[in-house]
Amino acid sequence: MSAVAISKLIDHVIQGAPGSVEAMHAGLLGPSVVGHLTMDDFPHLAVRLELLVPVFAGAIRNGAVGVNILLHGLPGSSKTQLAMVLAAVLHSRPSCD
């Protein structure tokens, strides 16, 4: 996307004066994608997830920043779906950067 196109998109969102952060995200990025998997779909990661979820829950509860994981794997190996499952379990939003 060109700088001009990005600028026009930002102007469009600002002109629309969205009422919430979610509305602004939807205006810039499009609607959120809803995951279709659950923790049960990752039995091979059960032990790791049992350790990971409380760490993230504590980080969210305490407002900690810089608590991250790197999901790696081949395209189509459900990395994004796992991030969505974790976000749903934690009542949070995934940041897939």
Image: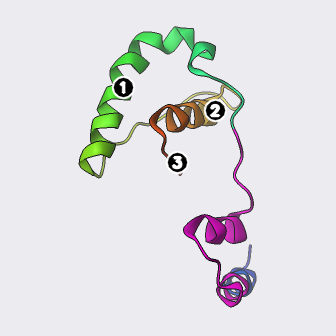
If you read the primary sequence from the N terminus, does the residue marked by circle 3 or circle 1 appear first?
1
Which residue is depicted at the point 68% across and 88% down?
11
Work out whether 9 lies above or below 47.
Answer: below
Crowd rating for badge 3 (residues with CA inside 10 Å; few <14, some 14–19, many 20+): few
Q: Which residues are magenta?
A: 11-34
CA distance separating discs 3 and 1: 16 Å
Q: Is residue 28 magenta?
A: yes
Spot occupied by residue 28 in the image (x, y as percentages of width and height): 68, 70
**Residue 67 as seen in the image, left or right of residue 28:** left
Say which residue label 1 marks: 52
Crowd rating for badge 1 (residues with CA inside 10 Å; few <14, some 14–19, many 20+): few
> Which one is in front, 14 or 71?
14
Work out whether 7 lies above or below 21.
Answer: below
CA distance separating discs 1 and 2: 16 Å
Report the quarter where the N terminus lies. bottom right
Say which residue label 2 marks: 81
The amino acid at mark 2 is Gln
